[in-house]
Image (cartoon, rainbow, N blue to C red):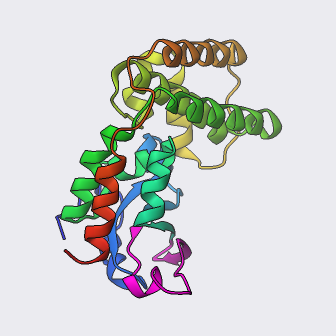
Amino acid sequence: MNESSIPDELPAWLAEVAGEQRYPLLFSTVSGAHLYGFPSVDSDVDLRGAHVLPVEEVAGLSHGPETLERTWTRDGVEVDLVTHDLAKFCRLLLGRNGYVLEQVLSPLVVTSSPAHEELAALAAGCVTRHHAHHYLGFARTQWRLFLKTLQLKPLLYTFRVLATGTHLMRTGELEADLTRLYAYGPAYLPDLVAAKRSAEHGPAPSTTGLEADVQRMTAELEQAGASSALPERATAGEALHDLVVRVRLGR
């Protein structure tokens, strides 16, 4: 396994998680608020990754679990781990899924491997202009949740996905950390991030122009997707197929 890059604010024992799972992990990374740049003091830790089912659990009449979910608490920290079998993970990558793209490219690495490095390198060949639809859909969901709850968390998620999507469409580079994307949003974003870091489930501060700013950023993402130089289709399909076969057979 390659060296992890767990931030100092996260418990070092996260590196032990890989050895505690039913199936070997190709990789696990930190997602959620820690990746997005606004974890609070009481944020849980979202781990995401890919596991590898053995040949006998994919080639016979019965099939092993394509998705595994586990939640537990250790030393007062709640951990949520979700992994997909490598084949499903690659299908999701090819299906214009921004969630798994962010997971495999997350710089907050808990568990890695040479195959993870190869998968991350191939991820660039999965990015298309149609990823804009993923981020637009996610933003609409979070904005509706904010209007229903008036909580700060879904509001920040709305701004985060709009900024991430626009940056991806314009540059071809994935950046999930909102604090590195302030240029895409309104001037009060740093204040919202500071408020979120002090409380995980607090209400959103009263801010003028929220709806107009969300509408503006939505329009910018729509335009960025329409004019993006990114390809129409993923180009990494054959290489990902080869990777899955080699990893499955232990080559």
Q: Position of residue 191 (x, y in %)?
A: 52, 27
Confirm whether residue 216 shows in the render.
yes
Tell me: residue 169, above or below residue 251: above
Name the side, left or right, on which 248 lies relative to 212.
left
Q: Residue at x 57, y 28 (%)?
A: 159
Please tell me whether residue 184 belongs to the stretch shown in magenta: no
Q: Residue furthest right?
A: 148
Tell me: residue 69, above or below residue 101: below
Q: Quadrant of residue 139?
A: top right
| Magenta residue span | 50-77
Q: Quadrant of the N terminus?
A: bottom left
Please tell me whether residue 55 belongs to the stretch shown in magenta: yes
- The residue lying toward the viewer, choosing from 64 and 72, is 64
Q: Quadrant of the C terminus?
A: bottom left
- The residue lying toward the viewer, choosing from 235 and 222, is 235
Name the side, left or right, on which 97 lies relative to 171.
right
Confirm whether residue 190 shows in the render.
no
Q: Residue at x 31, y 78 (%)?
A: 16
Q: Position of residue 59 (x, y in %)?
A: 45, 82
Q: Residue at x 45, y 59 (%)?
A: 89
Q: Residue at x 33, y 30 (%)?
A: 173
Q: Position of residue 93 (x, y in %)?
A: 44, 48
Name the side, left or right, on which 33 lies relative to 218.
left
Q: Position of residue 167 (x, y in %)?
A: 41, 23
Tell me: residue 209, above or below residue 50: above
Tell me: residue 109, above or below residue 168: below
